[in-house]
Amino acid sequence: MNKSSQALLFAALIASLQPAIVGAQEQTSSGLEEIIVTAQKRAERLVDVPMSISVMSGEALEERGFVNVQDLAFAVPGMTMREDGPGVYAIFMRGLSNQYGTGALVGVYLDETPISLTGYDQLDTRYYDMERVEVLKGPQGTLYGQGSVAGAVRYITKKPVLDAFAGSIEASLADVSGGDAKETFTGMVNIPIATDKFALRIAATKEQGGGWQDQPQAGIKNGNDQDLLNARVKALWQITDAFTAEATVITHRNEIQLGQGYEEADRTVTVGTNRAMRLLPRKFDYDLYSLNLTYDFGGFELLSSSNYIDHDHQVPFTYVGGPATIWNGSLEGAGVAWRDITQFSQEVRLASTGEGAWKWTVGAFYRDLKKDFYRLGQTRSGATLTTGQVLIQDETYESSSVFADVAYRFTERFEVGVGVRYFEDDQTMFDGATHDAESFDSVDPRAYASFKLTDDTNVYVSVAKGFRSGGLNRGTTLPNYGPESLISYEIGVKGAALDRMLAFEVAAYYSDYDDMLRRGLVYIPSQNTLLSNTANLGKVEVKGLEGGLTLRPNDMVTLHATAAYTDSDIKEVNALNSTSIAGDPVDYVPELSYTLGARFDFDIGAALPAFVRLDYSYRDKVSYVDRTSYPLANVPQYSDDIGLVDAGVGLTWSKATFELFGTNLSNENKWIDPYHGWSNANRTRPRTVGLKVGYSF
């Protein structure tokens, strides 16, 4: 599809006033049901929330065979990411992206637990037994803190049911084109221990195989096979009518022989310094513990959320400065790193629950994170091989904040709200020789207003500030870097029409992004050398338009479409020896992305409900600019334009379900990532076709 056709399609979508709601609506014979979200940390109708939110139900996630956040990124236009293997993600949104700094640009939460540990340490999450996923777009600093400059992703898991025993099991076998078969087993059981008082819900996923990457020089075939187990236990205790306790324990174990995620166009993996060297496998393990205590005072609710994470990560790494770089193949490296991270977080908040004119949320948050990092590697520069290179980097982050958000409804149609968060962050670093420490703080406000044209149509405007802490460069010779900040303005409309057969949303935004972080070079006179560091670059300007549509004209047909257009450019560069200059595009930002989908529900005979679905997602190429690593003729580096087709057909027979599914049906083999000049980029997963069989009881 050429650019003109894409532009016309996008304009048609926006003109139709489409919502960024991806397969989220519950379907009824009378149209689309209302969606309830908790994006503002209180239960509200999606149409009433004055921000752009993409919502996907747990059933839609499972039906489409989503494996991780990479799949979600293709389903939510305007959202991209860089992946360096499971759990090493950097999520980007709304034209804000960089791979530097110690904090995340997009905060990720599992229920009430923050699982964005650092900018490159996100807990790998499986999508089984999810209630829904909410993707909040734009700065969420008031309610979600400094790690949500560009937005937040919220995974909401299903709660135990107090009055009914239920369960399900499912087995899936899939053929990966050119690779190994993938076996997936999932199960859930809900057990009311004491009816209406105490219940357990246990959900688990086991994945094996599914690899397609080879390292022929080392005799490794399908080396990215996964051996994964994710188990979640939730307990719900209704202590009194007003007081509830909910505890969650999650255990995650995953081991992958070729676990970097990188590959070449021929589906092979290139290992620096020695093509036949077998790297240690990637091991990604964590245990998560959460306790939420809730008391309903009638009109407002008190929540205490205590969370602890213990995460161990063995990370193989490799890089090759290939022909596209200034090194032209003369610089390579490989090795392994170990990350041990613990995080304790505590949030206490009060939120209104009534139907009065006032709606409000106040609270406080505390986080204590410790990260021990040890790396052992080797480098080949020309003909010289240097082994036994050790890097130590132990870090601590202690942060606290207080926040408030209040809205007042002047009339049945008109509402105004304001919010603010005060944040403090204390950091330390030990690099094996020297200690360093730094503190940062910020005040992040938000203001918004909405006007209901009808009960189901809402127009809103908002302005919000986002903030991300600065950080510490290794060693005393490198200066530390300061924080980033963002002011974003948004106007949008969302709602439903045609007796709720149609749901729609469109939003336009403008953002000023100051002191964006990038890598630069600093000259150290005493060493007569240039050292790489993270520095504040300058100013970025972002303009964007998003929209979506869900149409259900009858009980059988559901159509949906979403689209996003983003213009993100660097306007000023203040740092010396920066990798970028004014006028450059911002890395990892597609100009245009969209999704199209259709589902057809029907009955086979009198007792066999069935469906057919078809989904298409498209994303423009994304760029990467680095004038310190690439000659000017090779700047920028680009990924590919990517269009993916998924489909499924299924039926239900009594309590059993059967589904034949396929992902990437056209077997696209393209660069997702533009960093392939260093053999550090992933490609689209091969065509996968499989069968799922499930049983509910």
Image (spheres, rainbow, N blue to C red):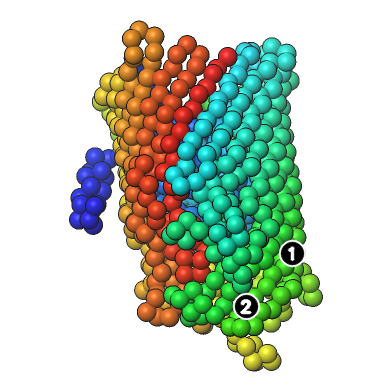
CA separation in Å, label 1 and label 2: 20 Å
Label 2 Cα neighbours within 10 Å, binned few <14 / some 14-19 / many ≥20? some
Q: Farthest residue toward the right?
A: 433
Where is residue 487? Give x, y as percent: 46, 59
Q: Residue at x 39, y 13 (%)?
A: 608
Amino acid at pointer 1: Tyr
Write the residue at 33% across / 9% down: 605
Residue 110's tag is: none
**Place of residue 470 in the rendered image (x, y in percent of width and height, measured from the top left):** 61, 66
Residue where numbered disc 2 is placed: 380
Residue 476 x, y percent position in the rendering:
72, 79
Q: Are marks 1 and 2 in contact (CB under 8 Å)?
A: no
Q: Secondary structure at mark 1?
A: strand
Residue occupying the point 24% across, 40% down: 16
Q: In which quarter of the view is residue 501 placed?
A: top left
Q: Residue at x 34, y 56 (%)?
A: 641
Residue 325 seen:
yes
Q: Quadrant of residue 205?
A: top right
- Left or right for 485, reference 637: right
Residue at mark 1: 374
